[in-house]
Each structure stands twice: as C-alpha cells, then as structure tokens.
Amino acid sequence: MKPISILEDRKNQVFTKGDDEFDISCGKKSLAGSVSQRACVFCGSRVVLYPITDALHLVHGPIGCASYTWDIRGALSSGPELHRMSFSTDLSGTDIIYGGEKKLEKALFELIDIYRPKAAFVYCTCIVGIIGDDVAAVCKKVEAKAGIPVLPVHSEGFKGTKKDGYKAACDALFSLIDRSREEIPEKIPLSINILGEFNIGGETWIIREYYKRMGIEVVSVMTGDSRVEDFSSSHRACLNVVQCSGSLTCLAQKMEKEYGIPFIRVSYFGIEDTSKALYDVASFFPDRPDIMEKTALLVREEVAAILPELYEIKADLKGKRAAIYVGGAFKAFSLIKALKHLGMEVVLVGSQTGNKEDYALLKDMCNPGTVILDDANPLELAKYVLEKDAHLFIGGVKEKPIAYKLGLGFCDHNHERKIPLAGFEGMKNFAREIHETVSSPVWDLVPRKCFVDVLK
C-alpha cells in the first residue's frame, strides 16, 4: 500500500503520543485544499439554534445553504415542529447585484403571517456578507411591525471557524434572553439552566427526569426541545450547567457577567461523567443535604441496573480498538472514559473545535501511540484508521462513508442518530450499539484489505 502523506502545513495539527513533542496547533481556519471535515460558521450557528421548536429559522442566502443544513440536528420535539421546516430567501444572481434586503423583508412578513412563530432567526450566509445587506436593520423593521423578536444571526461562513458560528448563535440567544429580563430578577429556588443539550435522541427528557428526581427545577434547556417562552425566565436560574462546552460556553460567560449566574462544565455521557454531573449540581446547593441524598440514591439505582449487561458486553469487546473524531473535544473526553469501561482502546482521537487545553488533556488520557488530530480531513482519518488497525470509528455523518469504505464498524455520535446516548440509559444504548457493530459477522465478508486499493 502506498503511504498517505500529511500536508506540510498541517503537520503541527497531527501528533502521536510518545513520538512527538506535544505543541499542537489549533483554533485556526482550515487549510485550503485539505477538504476539512469541519463545518462553516453558518453551520455552527444553525446547529445551536435549530432545536428551538416554535421559532422561525430563515436562511438568508442561496438555496444550497438551507438545503445543506436542513434538519441538521434531527432534534426531537415534544410539541411544535416549526424548526424542521427549512426556509430560505434563495438569493439569485439578480439579488446579488441589486441586494436582497427587500426579498428578506417580504419573506419574513409572509412566513410570520403563515406560521405565527414566537420568534424568528435570520441566518446570514457568505454571500450576504459580501454584498453588504443590512440584515439587522431589516430584522428591526420587521420586529416593530410583527410584534415578535426577529434576531439576526451574523454567521457569514467566511468569518472564521465553526466556533465563530457558536458565538454568533450565543449572541442571538443572549439578545433574546435580555429582552425579557427584569432589572432585579427574583431567583427561582433550586433551579438550573442546561446549556448545550440538543435533544437529538431524547436526551433532554432523560436529563430533566434525573433532576426532577433530585428535586432540581430545570428552567430552560438551550436549546433541546425548547420554546421561545422558556428563555424569558432563564436569567432567574441559580446555576448554568454547560453540557457541550464548545457551543454555549460563550453564552454562559455572558450570563455570568450580566446576571451573576455561575456556571459549571459537565458531560452526561458515560457512567463516570453522568454521575459527576449530577453530584456537581447537587453540591451547588449545600444547604439542602436532601438533594445530595436523592442524587446518591439515583446514581446507585441507575448504575446497578446497567452494570450486569455492561460486564457481559465488555467480555466480548476487550482489546478492540476505536477511532474517535467528533465536533467538540469535551465529547471526546467522555467517549474515551466510556470505551475504557467497555475494555476498548482508543488509537485515534480528534476534534473540529478543540483548544490547546483540550488537546493537552486528551494527551494525558490516551495511551502511548495514540494519534491526536485537530481539524482532520478524510485522507488523514483513513490513513490512521488503517495504520492503527481500528475495529470501530465513532464520528458523524461525514465520517460514516470513510468507515464503511474501509470495512470497519461505525457508531454515529453526532446529529443523525436516533437513540439517546446521554445518561445511564444512554450508556447502555451506546454499549449495545458498539457491541452489535463490532461483533457483526458482516466484517468477515468485507475485510479491510479489500479496500486499501482505494488509498493507493
């Protein structure tokens, strides 16, 4: 097999633990020509705001941008499903020459009249930034007449990386929250907001139930299965619990500065991190020891219910090798811990949006020889999956074809999955999926050696 080389300008974004001096380069724009797996600024904003179920989401730009991000989160709703509609101003060549502001205004009034949303988000795409449409002015004009919040999301794709899209979404969300706050808000006792949970497979409902059993009120979830009205009281919560650190940490920081709401970072994936998340929230209310008692009971019951099956699965998976490539590095931390519980070794791990601190922690968590990548491309991923002889690839929709073409199992841990992977129930679901995938007899029929010609 002909070896696959790494682009010269990307060599500082790929490291092997124990072989290289670790000083990873990250947080920069993708290298031109590398066909990055990373999404654009616009896409980053969409994945954060999309699950607000009773809001209008209008993409101001060419139809391709709306098509690419339709149903991008696959977020489940317990009520309205307006978010699953994909609206676009469908800018054409004429609009680019003469401007698209009138078309945007007309589209907003028409859609608001038909669907009666509680708020509207207008996403700016690359072309809008280039032609200079004053989207904020149009939104302000429509809001004054329509009587609902109309919020510009300044997410022009060329502005930076996916993380800049997260910031654009946080700015829009904060604007929505800030409109309804009182001068001196009265705190809701024993309450939290959950930030960065998107209810892809019903995780929001599982996590809410845990906190209900603990005696904690969840004021709002940002943004899984959320309603615009939910955000009107979010500034009254006692604590912000940030689940996906990359996407909504910026909002948590804004809320801490403006409203005095402290925040903690947690993960609800895997036994260890889920337990810690619940205990950390309980410990925030030290004057209520009964909450900690309920939490300890909850954890004992939930762990006892799943451990026997996990031990059986571990016996079959022990020694198997996994590759991980996900959006945020915080998710990778939990995946490594969960796979260790199942007896599996991580041989490759990377993310789209990790920072230096994230990668330093990944290095400490991984075994010698593990490849650590920032903002990878398909050839790099294929190269290391083959070299490390992985049995499983965990990633998103763009990594699935890579895994299947190379003849190894795949687990979707991103936007397109249909089963919940959060909490104790989620750990059981994850273990079952990994077991069924890695143990499938189909891999005996499509050995990896049949696919190495693809990379020659």
Image: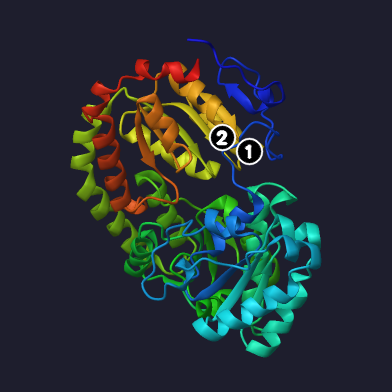
Disc 1 from disc 2: Cα separation: 6 Å
What sort of colour scheme is used for the picture? Answer: rainbow
**Mark 2 neighbour class, 10 Å CA radius: few under 14, some 14 to 19, many 20 or more:** few
Residue bearing mark 2: 361
Toward the top, the furthest residue is: 1
Q: Residue at x 53, y 75 (%)?
A: 55
CB-based contact (under 8 Å), mark 1 and mark 2: yes
Q: Tell me the residue at 64%/31% (across/down).
A: 34
Looking at the picture, which amino acid does disc 1 mark?
Answer: Glu
Q: Which mark is residue 108?
A: none
Horizontal and vertical percent position of residue 271: 34, 46
Let me know if residue 18 appears in the view: yes
Please tell me which residue lies in front, 41 or 99: 99
The quadrant in which residue 184 appears is: bottom right
From the viewer's perspective, is 35 left or right of 229?
right
Q: Secondary structure at mark 1?
A: helix
Estimate how packed mark 1 is, as few (under 14), some (14 to 19) or many (20 or more) residues with alpha carbons within 10 Å.
few
Residue 92 against residue 114 in the figure, above or below: above
Residue 43 rendering spot, x and y as whole percentages: 59, 54
The residue to which callout 1 is attached is 357
- Residue appearing at x 62%, y 69% in the figure: 173
Closer to the camera in the image, 383 or 420: 383
Asked if 153 appears above or below 230 in the picture, the reply is: above
Query: Against 119, is 444 above or below?
Result: above
Tell me the amino acid under the disc marked 2.
Leu
